[in-house]
Image: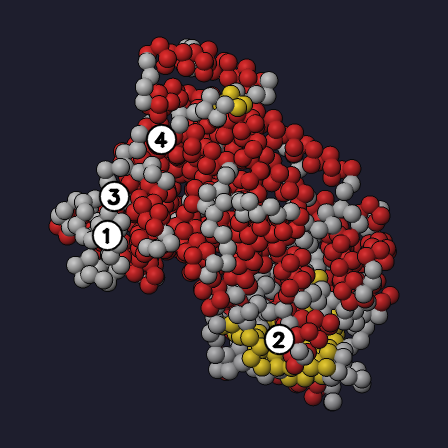
Amino acid sequence: MTTAAPLLDVAGLTIQFPTGTPVIDFGFAVAEGETVAVVGESGSGKSLTALAIMRLLPRSAKIAAGRIRFAGRDLLALPEPEMRRVRGREIAMIFQEPMTSLNPVLTVGRQIAEVLRLHEGLSAEAARTRSIELLDLVRVADPHRRVDDYPHRLSGGMRQRVMIAMAVACRPHLLIADEPTTALDVTIQAQVLDLLDRLRRDLGMALVLITHDLGIVGQWADRVVVMYAGRRAEEAEAGILLDDPLHPYTRGLLAASPRLDTSLHYTAGPLREIPGSIASAIAQPGCPFVPRCPLALPSCRLKPPPLEEVRPGRFVACPVTTAGERADAVAVGR
Amino acid sequence: MAIVELAPEAPVVAPAVGTWRALRAFLRNPAAVIATLFLLLVTLIAIAAPLIYPEDPLSMVARPFLWPGQNPKFPLGSDSLGRDVAAGLVWGARISLVIGIAAMALGVTIGIVVGATAGYFGGRIDDALVRLIEIFQTTPSFLMLVVLVAIAEPRVESITVAIALVTWPTIARLVRAEFRSLREKDFVTAARGLGYGHARIIFIEILPNALPPIIVTSSVIVASAILMESALSFMGLGDPNRISWGSMIGAGREMLRTAWYLTLIPGIAIVLTVLALNLIGDALNDALNPRLSAER
Amino acid sequence: MSMFESRRLLRVLRRTVVQAVPTVLGIVVLNFLLLQLAPGDAADVMAGESGAATEEGMAMLRRQFGIDLPLLQQLMAYLGNLARLSLGFSPRYGMPVGELISQRLPSTLMLMGLALVIALAVGIALGTAMAMTAGRWPDRVISVISLIFYSVPGFWIGLMLIVLFSVKLGWLPSGGQETIGGGLAGFDMVADRLKHMILPATSLALFYVAIYSRLTRAAVLEVASQDYVRTASAKGLSPLSVTVRHILRNALLPVTTLAGIHLGGILGGAVVVETVYSWPGLGRLAFESVMRRDFNVLLGVLLLSSLLVILANTLIDLLQAWLDPRIEVR
């Protein structure tokens, strides 16, 4: 949709482990300032994709194919020292577990200051001042005192705010948030997401929001990429995807997630589970969703369906539903 | 002295299946197999010592200061008094193994009794026994050992008891920790519910499940007992009527500048034997704690 | 350090001291009773050495040493002395035990200190190197080396080092604490002392190098899998910075605990190594006093070494409380 080259462009990404291939031919793009949600259940490969962009995959993992371009550079070809200048400065990342993602033996101030001193060459004094400002920016109360606290004295929500302060310290162009609210209380979740959204606008960042919860994407994401068993199942603008999901997996996810949108809350009917689990996708020659799919055709078992752009900016990897979509398209005379 | 890194929660396995799996894992480790074979060889030599060298190893049989290889009759040479170094080595293996194994057995027994009592009953008994363990562990063990042996007159028996006395706290702490975690498990509660006595629960129900770490530590304790015995003998606190590797080094020390082989050869015997025991300890640890070895 | 920090450390200190008092008392009583089991006393040994001693002469010696009194009375007298911070008198050396020990203590402390520094520095470095190359060949090679260190008797490696560095190469002295009659001063004296210390400290340290390296390896591997290490990498820190600033600082917590536990072992090892290198320290004093049945000296050395171990553990507790802000006093 965007005319300019995207800020981040992941294409054909395949990640291999000795025991399997959890990410296969996956791709998505993020424009400057945009929020893209990558949605999938645990084990779908979304966190591995995030780590691959940061080039922080575990040693046993290998990027077997694909390309990751960021701001005109090929990240996979970058020498490690240059990649280190990208991490934390141009692309920052926050993780799911705020309880364990902060070093327990260093004060939060030192952990924020560390990234400032590294990338901006600030003095200890200046870094501390900025750390306090950053704590204030992420709405930590009493930042002058908190800056000297150790992580174990903070609540989970506070720790996630500290993580966010650390991530935005160098005003990165892209922030990857891997399940940033999963470990938090429901009441805190919306606060943290609002904070991320506000920072995105104020600092002009793009945001990749990795989540298993379709319920949160409508309010905070511009575009949604649905990931299943390491592949892209569907991609669309958030509103369109929520109103008219095409892939049977997306439909299942939507039926299984409570909507934050209250008007729909009572009309959407009972929550339904998707039968089976993602583990059944392993060693499937055909579409990985076949064992759980209510619409599967015999041909679905033979080879994975290709991803098709059914409308501009709208991709689906399901021949059954896209056939219907095309018929619709013909019917309205396009 | 003996330090083994153990998983705080050793896996509770059904003994029969676990033993076979562990044994297979152990046998797949080439270093462990070689070490075991070497130890078997040393044991055989020790047992057969009277057949290989019927004569008293302390008797003078050759010209003094024969270097190794100088006289084929005495392949490892002779010492300042014309004693055969090879004969000393063979007879010394007896002392090292006997004291190492006996001291381990005694120390482990004391350690299990004290540790099991403390861990199983808890409360006041536990407090008192932990204090006792602390007292022993606060005194440097080798210093304590020297004092014990000197007091009791150095003989094989007293040295064995003394080594056991400085060793048991290690096992006791380990067993106590195991029992403290195991006594809360369901199968123990069930045994209590059936009205079994304390002794039965301790020895039949809990102890078998606490065995893996005890076995691992035991092999390391044999190794450290051999080291302690050799150090005692080196300092002249060994049994004066028996030849041991440590006493050979102690005697050779006087001629260190000229006849250093007298120190080198028995030392290598100690190092190889102790190394074999430690390799076996490592392999046992890997075999009995698969969770840990997977991380390696 | 903030007010809060220092108050926390003070509480740790107080708790340790309170717990140590009964242990020390137990040690004194236990040691005292143990030594009473020994056949023979100082009078016997002196009489044996002089060759000619009458019953009356022996009785007089015993009265003089205070070892003719009933056991309980002797124990009370000893504890009474302790309460006045006196370790009693050594009949054999003809001087107060406290004075005797304080003459020997510094050389042993220096030896142990250097051995501990070597053991920790080399052990932590090797352990970190092993963990960073886990499963690959540097890890395997260092593992084997460390297992060999773990299996070598300290006295024997001491003798072998003498053969190599003193006898064959002539680089380092084979024993003693300083060049006798060297008349050295200033920097030369320090260098001379250091030269005399290298071999004994190395012999003493090797076993603990093995222990600390294995422990560090395990601890670093454990910490390296923690989430906050990934956070540190995501900040763009270099592997070295991540290891030093984020991994090691956490991994050292278990290593320092063990360093304290092993201090007693190092002191015990000093007894043997001091014998090998004719090092005039506490270990040799203990050994000599055992042989001479000079129980006042022996009791003093035993008590002092226990106190050293307790002191070291207290320091370790404080160090841990300082390193790990999560330690709160219960």
State the image coordinates of residue B110 (x, y, percent, origin top left).
35, 32
Q: Is residue A243 visible?
A: no
Q: CA distance from mark 2 to mark 4?
A: 80 Å
Residue B150 marker: 4
Q: CA distance from mark 2 to mark 3?
A: 79 Å
* Mark 2: few/some/many CA within 10 Å (<14, 14-19, 20+): many
In which chain is the residue bearing label 1? B
What residue sits right under mark 2 in the picture?
A233
Name the amino acid, label 3: Ile
Question: SS of the residue at dot 3?
Answer: loop
**Which of label 1 and label 4 is nearer to you?**
1
Residue A169 marker: none
What residue sits right under mark 1 in the picture?
B64
Question: SS of the residue at dot 1?
Answer: loop
- Respond whether the residues carrying marks 1 and 3 are from the same subunit: yes
**Which of label 1 and label 2 is nearer to you?**
1
In which chain is the residue bearing label 2? A
What residue sits right under mark 3 in the picture?
B243
Name the amino acid, label 1: Pro
